[in-house]
Amino acid sequence: MCGIVGYIGEKDCADVLISALTKLEYRGYDSAGIAVFENGKIKVEKSKGALSDLVNKMRDDESKPNGTCGIGHTRWATHGEPSDINSHPHGNKRITIVHNGIIENYKQIKEFLMSQGYAFESQTDTETVAKLLDYYYNGDPFETITKVIGEIQGSYALGILFRDFPDRIFAVRKDSPLIVGIGKGENFIASDVPAILKYTRDYYLLEHDEIAVLKKSGVKVYDIHHEEIKKELQRANWDVDAAEKGGYEHFMLKEINEQPGAVRTTISPRISDGLINFSECGLTNAMLNSFKQIHIVGCGTAMHAGIVGQYLIESLARVPVIVDIASEFRYRKPIVSENDLVIFISQSGETADTLAALRLAKKCGAKTLSIVNVKGSSIARESDMVIYTHAGPEISVASTKAYSVQLSVMYLLAFQLSLAKGKITEEGCRLLVAQLQQIPSYIEASIKLMEQCQFVSSKLVNADSLLYIGRGLDYALSMEGSLKLKELSYIHSEAYAAGELKHGTISLISDGMPVIAVATQSELFEKTISNVIEVKSRGAFVIAICKETDDIGPDVADHVIKLPELNDIFMPIVTAIPLQLIAYYTAVLKGCNVDKPRNLAKSVTVE
Ligand code: M6R
């Protein structure tokens, strides 16, 4: 939530900040602002609304700051409504900051500062940090920052300008991500790599409470005792185009289309000689064999990938799996032992609840494995082992390609675990691996169903509410389909286990209510169809999704989408595509902001 950037160099700073913020708008779009040194003074421009509102405002008022050093912010509101006054940067003429995170003890600090004569303009927690910096400022930025981070509690990534030091930017972080981009004669701070890709691929990962001082000529990083730290330079392998729309109308559509490649790139480095090799992360077969129980933890789409993983692991490897929403896991006193493996799934690697759950699992002594897309993110760094998904940057708030690559790692894990537990032979494993390698071409075929999905969307666009139903893996997938539709189109929907309908939910069915029935599991097909008939006969408008060879007549469904014929276990990864496309086109038809749905942010770094 919230994205911060900073630039020092020779270019027009406001332009660089705006361009960098454009790449971080997925982190929040309630307001935007920049602060730039202009003739030795800090000039602030900020505005409620999207970044484009700020750009328009600066153009209309001819107020764009002119300088080469500054910081910027795009906000997802936590404390205080989205408004001009609550927009970042915050501070005064001598110290100005941008902040991503939450200051938990801001009320106490605010009360203290008010007792010292400070007046507050905004309702934000951030303003207390700006004022606390001002309170302690003694001409030495380093000492001041150290004092402040010793007092604030919570999470923060801060970019700080001191009027007395117009040739530098200060940055510090704890539990909110921050990288320091290293260019030639220019340097950057940013919440995420895509913000700096246009300018440089080289960056440092700032660790907790390390303080970075950026000048045009170079960057130094210190610990809180002012000892300089030698940082290892990281190189981003994402290309610049990866963070651009590349001719697509929306990032989401581009990312849906990128799925075949993303799955290929994620599975191929883990396959050698037709078998799976996890040596890169130190996950040996002996280790896999030793686990008595597995927990899978994540939020939203990532958690849904975990549910598919649960079905796969339990049915193939016969190891018990418990799936938890991270925000529940961390507070429900889960029973986790040293013999357990706890898997954390996260695209961003920064989700606050997932990170807290990871820390809890480590405390319980379990082995932790994360499946993460963003290299060097907090979850990746804090887990015992990490398997990176190679989806490239996912910009659209709604996860699509991240889900597919998470599923592909779930397949690899389930197969390897089955082999390690002696539930499948090496030959059997080879066969499954070979089938998995074919999946990208089936995803391509699935993407070609675009027009049919558009047609289905035209039937959903005026619905108030709809149901997704399925059994087994189809139910697991229905949850993801339903989430995608509601987050994008704001149409209420629920996913139900088809067999559960009769226990209450079927009373919701009324004339014309759309029901999306996912029926791709051969063993469960007949049973699911019986449930479909039950809703159809009560007036539902049924859209069925099944395999090519399945026969579903007009008496059962009003529209049928047929998918390529595959081994049942692989159906979720190809069925996800029409569900994503249906959600996408419905949102487009409704005129919703597809890449930035209301109230959401891509990276949820607060509880
Ligand atoms: O970065 P993460 O994978 O940890 O994010 C978890 C969820 O916030 C995320 O999957 C969210 O549900 C999706 N963006 C929804 O499409």
Image (cartoon, helix red, strand yellow):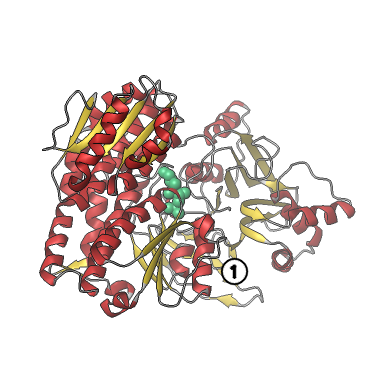
The residue lying toward the viewer, choosing from 467 and 60, is 467
How crowded is the residue under tag 1: few (<14 C-alpha within 10 Å), some, or many (20+)?
many
Which image quadrant for residue 235? bottom left
Residue 443 visible somewhere in the drawing? yes
- Residue at left 13%, top 71%? 426
How far across and down, in percent of the image, does residue 230 sit? 51, 75
- Residue at left 64%, top 53%? 102
Task: Name the side, left or right, on which 406 lies relative to 105.
Answer: left
Which image quadrant for residue 457? top left
Q: In the rendered view, would you say 2 is above or below 354? A: above
Q: In the rendered view, would you say 555 is above or below 399? A: above
The residue lying toward the viewer, choosing from 101 and 157, is 101
- Residue at left 27%, top 52%? 262
Secondary element type, mark 1: loop
Q: In the rendered view, would you say 347 is above or below 19? A: below
Residue 245 visible somewhere in the drawing? no
How far across and down, in percent of the image, does residue 259 sit? 26, 47
Q: Amino acid at mark 1?
A: Glu
Q: In the rendered view, would you say 307 is above or below 356? A: above
Task: Name the side, left or right, on which 71 lies relative to 533.
Answer: right
Q: Which residue is mark 1?
A: 210
How far across and down, in percent of the image, does residue 294 sit? 38, 67
How far across and down, in percent of the image, does residue 550 sit? 14, 37
- Residue at left 29%, top 49%? 472
For this orientation, the residue located farthest to the front is 503
